[in-house]
C-alpha cells in the first residue's frame, strides 16, 4: 500500500502542483492544529502517503516538522494572551519526555495490535467523559496540595466572554501518571501525544479548554523537536516535501491561534470531540486490520 | 466569580513576568518568521534553478522517491547555502524551525530565574536535560 500512488492523478503531478496543493492543505491543517492543541500529523501523514505515495518515513519526518510548525506558529499569540500555562506545561513535559524515553527503551517488547486497541479504547473513553462534561465549570475546582505548592493556578482574558477567567488545578499526581503513560504510548506507536494531553488537562486537572489546548500546543512542539532532530540527522526530512508543509502550517497556525481566544469554549470542545472520536475509531480499526 | 485574586502576586514580580512573556513571544515570532522566510526563499530558488519542476511529472517522482540528493548534515547544508542551493536553504530554514521549541525551553529557564522561581528553574532544566537525553538515545538507537 504505502509507497505507491493511490490518488489517480498523482502519477502525472508536477513538483509545482504538489507544492501548491500541499501548501493549501497545510494551511487548513495548521488552523485546526493550533485550535485543538494537536499537531497537523493526522491530516499531513495520510495526505502524503495515501495521496502522493510518499514513503512513510519521509511522511513522518514532514509530520514531525509540521508539529513544531503548529506549536511555534501559534505560540507567539498564546504566550502573549497568557493562554499557555507554562508551569503546567513544564511539569507535565517531565512526565511525557520520561515516558517517551521509557517507550523508546522498551520498544519491541509489545504487540502493537494490543497497543492500538488500548489507545483506541482510552480515546473513546476520553471522548465519552468529555462529552458528559459539556459545560465548563472551572469555578468549583479546588486546588490539590501539590498544585498549590507548585503554583499551577493561572488566569487569562477570555476575548469571547469579554472577561478575565481565573482557574485552579486539581489531580496533579494523576495527571503526571497519565502523561507518563501517554509518553510511552506515543513513543511505541509513533503517534503525537497531543490527543492524550488535552483530555488529561481537561478531565483530570480541569483546566479551561482553551488553556488545555494552548498548553498542549506548547508541549507537542517540545516533544516533537527531539524526534525531529533524529529524523533530520537520518535524512528523513526531505526539503522538497517538507517545505510546503512547514510554510503552510506556520501560516495556518498563526491564523488559528488568533481564532482560539475569540471562539466559544463549547465550540472548541465540540470540534475536539469529533477529532477524538475519529482517531479512536482509526486506532481500533488498525488493531483489527489484517 | 473573579471577585478576589486567587493567588497573591507582588506587583514587581508580575511586571517582570509580563515583560518576560512579551520577550519570549517576540523571540518566537522572530524565529518562526526567519525560518518561514528562508524556507520560502529556498523553494523559489529551487524552482528558478529547475524550470522543469513546473511541467515534469517525472521530476516529481524523482524528488519524492529517488535517491536523496539533498543535504542533511550541518556541514553540507552550510556548504549548499554558500552555493545558494534551494534545497540547502530549505533545510537550513527547517533546522531553525526545529530549534525554536528547544530555544524556548532554554529561555524559559532564564525567565523563571528572573522571577526568582527556583522550583521552576529546576523543573525546566530537567525538561531540557531530558530533551538532550532523548535526542542522544535517538542518535544511538
Image (tube, coloured by chain):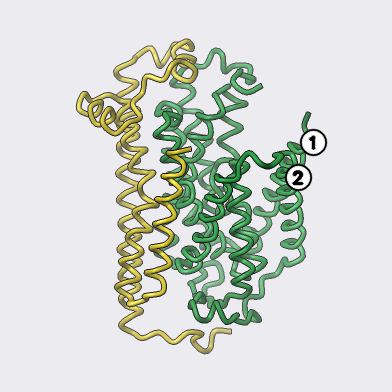
Chain colours: A green, B yellow
Q: Quadrant of the C terminus of chain A?
A: top right
Quarter of the image containing the N terminus of chain A? Answer: top right
Residue A30 location, x and y as percent? 51, 45
Vertically, is B37 above or below B55? below
The image's mark for residue A288 is 1
Q: What secondary structure is found at the residue carrying circle 2?
A: helix
Could you say where residue A134 lies in the image, as x and y percent from the top left? 72, 66
- Which residue is found at the position 39% from the left and 44% from the top? B98
Whole-percent x, y for residue B14 in the image = 36, 79
Question: Residue at label 2?
Answer: A117
The answer to whether marks 1 and 2 mark residues whose Cβ atoms lie closer than 8 Å is yes
Q: Is residue A19 above or below residue A149?
A: above
Along the line of sight, the residue nearer the viewer: B27 or A157: B27
Q: Residue at x 61, y 32 (%)?
A: A46
Q: Residue at x 54, y 24 (%)?
A: A54
The tag on residue B141 is none
Q: Position of residue B131 (x, y in %)?
A: 43, 52
- Is circle 1 on the same chain as circle 2? yes
Q: Earlier in the sequence, mark 1 or mark 2?
A: 2
Residue count near mark 1 (Cα–Cα under 10 Å), binned few <14, some 14–19, many ≥20: few
Q: Could you tell whether A93 is left or right of B33 in the image?
A: right
Toward which corner of the image does residue A140 lie, by quadrant? bottom right
Label 1: element kind: helix
Near mark 2 (Cα within 10 A), the count class, few <14, some 14-19 or many ≥20, is many
Residue at mark 1 to residue at mark 2: CA–CA distance: 8 Å
Amino acid at each position: 500500500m504505502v509507497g505507491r500512488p493511490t490518488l489517480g492523478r498523482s502519477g502525472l503531478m508536477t513538483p509545482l502542483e504538489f507544492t501548491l496543493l500541499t501548501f493549501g492543505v497545510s494551511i487548513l491543517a495548521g488552523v485546526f492544529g493550533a485550535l485543538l492543541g494537536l499537531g497537523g500529523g493526522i491530516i499531513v501523514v495520510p495526505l502524503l502517503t495515501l495521496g502522493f505515495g510518499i514513503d512513510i518515513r519521509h511522511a513522518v519526518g514532514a509530520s514531525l516538522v509540521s508539529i513544531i510548525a503548529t506549536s511555534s506558529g501559534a505560540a507567539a499569540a498564546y504566550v502573549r494572551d497568557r493562554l499557555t500555562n507554562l508551569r503546567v506545561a513544564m511539569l507535565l513535559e517531565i512526565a511525557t519526555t520520561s515516558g517517551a524515553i521509557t517507550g523508546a527503551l522498551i520498544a519491541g517488547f509489545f504487540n502493537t495490535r494490543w497497543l492500538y486497541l488500548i489507545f483506541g479504547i482510552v480515546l473513546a473513553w476520553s471522548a465519552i467523559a468529555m462529552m458528559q462534561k459539556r459545560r465548563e465549570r472551572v469555578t468549583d475546582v479546588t486546588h490539590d496540595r501539590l498544585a498549590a505548592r507548585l503554583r499551577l493556578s493561572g488566569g487569562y482574558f477570555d476575548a469571547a466572554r469579554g472577561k478575565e477567567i481565573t482557574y485552579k488545578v486539581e489531580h496533579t499526581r494523576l495527571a503526571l501518571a497519565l502523561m507518563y503513560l501517554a509518553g510511552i504510548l506515543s513513543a511505541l506507536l509513533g503517534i503525537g501525544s497531543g490527543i492524550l494531553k488535552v483530555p488529561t488537562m481537561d478531565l483530570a486537572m480541569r483546566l479551561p479548554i482553551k488553556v488545555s489546548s494552548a498548553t498542549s500546543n506548547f508541549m507537542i512542539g517540545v516533544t516533537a523537536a527531539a524526534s525531529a532532530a533524529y529524523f533530520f540527522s537520518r535524512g528523513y526530512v526531505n526539503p522538497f516535501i517538507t517545505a510546503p508543509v512547514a510554510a503552510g502550517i506556520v501560516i495556518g497556525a498563526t491564523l488559528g491561534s488568533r481564532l482560539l481566544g475569540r471562539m466559544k469554549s463549547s465550540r472548541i470542545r465540540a470540534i475536539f470531540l469529533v477529532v477524538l472520536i475519529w482517531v479512536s475509531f482509526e486506532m481500533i480499526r488498525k488493531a483489527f486490520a489484517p | 466569580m473573579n471577585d478576589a485574586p486567587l493567588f497573591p502576586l507582588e506587583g514587581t514580580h508580575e511586571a517582570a513576568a509580563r515583560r518576560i512573556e512579551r520577550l519570549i513571544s517576540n523571540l518566537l515570532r522572530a524565529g518562526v518568521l526567519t525560518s518561514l522566510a528562508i524556507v520560502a526563499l529556498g523553494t523559489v530558488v529551487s524552482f528558478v534553478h529547475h524550470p522543469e519542476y513546473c511541467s515534469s511529472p517525472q521530476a516529481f517522482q524523482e524528488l519524492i522517491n529517488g535517491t536523496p540528493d539533498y543535504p542533511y548534515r550541518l556541514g553540507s547544508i552550510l556548504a549548499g547555502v554558500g552555493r545558494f542551493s534551494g534545497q540547502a536553504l530549505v533545510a537550513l530554514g527547517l533546522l531553525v524551525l526545529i530549534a525554536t521549541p528547544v530555544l524556548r525551553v532554554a529561555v524559559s529557564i532564564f525567565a523563571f530565574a528572573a522571577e526568582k522561581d527556583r522550583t521552576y528553574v529546576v523543573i525546566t532544566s530537567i525538561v531540557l536535560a531530558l530533551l538532550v537525553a532523548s535526542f542522544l538515545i535517538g542518535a544511538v538507537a
